[in-house]
Image (cartoon, grey):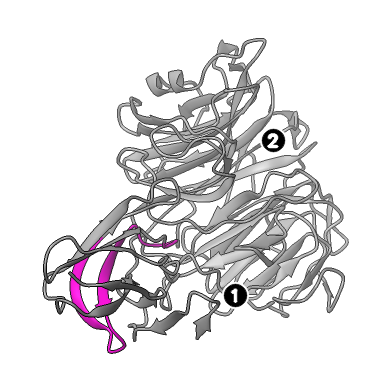
Amino acid sequence: MGRRLLAVIGAAGLAFGLIPAPPAVSTGASLTAVANSAWQTDASVLGLAVAKGKAYVGGRFTKVRPPGAAAGTNQTTRTYLAAFNQTTGALDTSFNHTLNGFVWAIVASADGSRVYVGGDFTRVDGQVRNRIAAFDTATGALVSTIKPSVSYRVKALAIGGTSLYFGGSFGLVNNIARNRAAAISTVNGSLLPWNPNADADVYAIDAADDNSKVYLGGTFAKIGGTNRWAVASVNNSTGALLPFAAASAVPLPTGGCTSRVKDIETSGNRVYFANAGDGGGCFDGTWAADVATGNLVWKNTCLGATEALTVLNGWLFKGSHAHSCPGAFSDGTGTHFLLLQNPANGSLGPWFPNTNAGPPTLVGPLVSATGGSDLWVGGDFTKVNGVGQQGLTRFTNLGNGAAPLGPVLPTLSSTTVGQVKATVQTSLDNDDITLTYRLLRGATNTIVATTTANSTFWSRPTITLTDPTAPSGTTQMYRIEAYDGHNAVRGGYSTIKVR
């Protein structure tokens, strides 16, 4: 199933005031754009899962450090795998294992009692674990019964019923042919008959919530000898191909375009896919299919490879390096690594924090997971919202959320006796699209007009508010206040002689 449980400022004279908020913020996205405190890693995070109050994190890192610590300082050794407190973001010092190779994927059992880890490693704390291992979340101990021998990299993991499905670059499991996809029992670790037999790497895997079928994504061209480019739906016990009309959303490769599936997220009666393309204008977007029928529900054609998907709070989180989204923003607006989409139609939602992209891949977010109301994001970034934060970050629904940008000085006009019109560009709020604007008159900041308007980083329209009771013949000061329901920000004053 999907990975769920899951002061005065400058010459303009801006004043920032906080409005008291309940414990959980009511933003448009039900998730603040303000990153919460979290420890950092010294290299990329590639795998994430949240279970029993902890976030389990794997990747290329060998050291972790507290929030705010500069790279190379105040480090604690954690070799490719670590756990952090879900509530505080702090390192869980009780979970400390040494692996001898990268971790590429982590998944939690449905009841949260175990986490399964896949990657390049062949040893955990000196014990043989060929590319898959399991840990008890209550004790942190390595599970003795889960130790299949996988011949090469495991890149994706998913739980369906009592099956652990996994995909990657391997050809053998327990010396039995399993080309790039296989399954073991979560009860006793035995190899299962499930055998899709992919002819190239599997990057992503997920089971339907009812385990009625399993979805694969990657760079393969055939499943079980039958042509299936980059995505497939297969039987949950045999791995045999199932009809999947929505697969047509992924274009067949050409000399100028190769698009492959990088992540899969199932949620209820929908399954969502993330694509990354090589070649100018090649499909990098997301798409959704109906689990029961296999039909395409929608397709979003943003450009900038999509690497991670997570469903939470009624939204589809997308980690990508989107630089152009038809119907929304175009090239020239920068790269937007963190976005939300409406699961019903793929349209962009009201949530616009951002990261950068760091070495080695220069991609940005690579993986995400939720514990139910929070969002953990891992990748190769070194900044979040312009502040140093490497490898790992988290967002919650607690606090006041992001404040709107301070409104600019209004342009004033008075062509009618006793009336003043104030025109101003709408503000921007990173977790609310709809803001309330108030026209304030004089040093007493008397509210003389109120309106609401929508704005996004790609569309900030101009609005006009009118004071119908301006004292004729006097000189008055006006300013604009933008309010998101929790945070109120006021701009500087403009003056005018009232007609």
User: Quick check: is 446 in the magenta stretch?
Assistant: yes
Q: Which residues are magenta?
A: 429-452
Which of the pair 483/485 is nearer the observer? 483
Q: Residue at x 56, y 18 (%)?
A: 229
> Amino acid type of disc 1?
Ala
Kind of residue at badge 2: Gly
Tell me, yes or no, if residue 469 can be seen here.
Answer: yes
Tell me residue 141's x, y (percent). 70, 70
Residue pointed to by mark 2: 168
Q: For residue 344, which quarter of the picture? A: top left
Would residue 51 appear left or right of 147 to someone viewing this image?
Answer: left
- Binning the other alpha carbons within 10 Å of mark 2 as few (below 14), some (14 to 19) or many (20 upward) gives many
Q: Main secondary structure of the magenta part?
A: strand
Q: Is residue 349 left or right of residue 76?
A: left
Query: Looking at the picture, does residue 253 appear above or below residue 83?
Result: above
Q: Which residue is mark 1?
A: 138
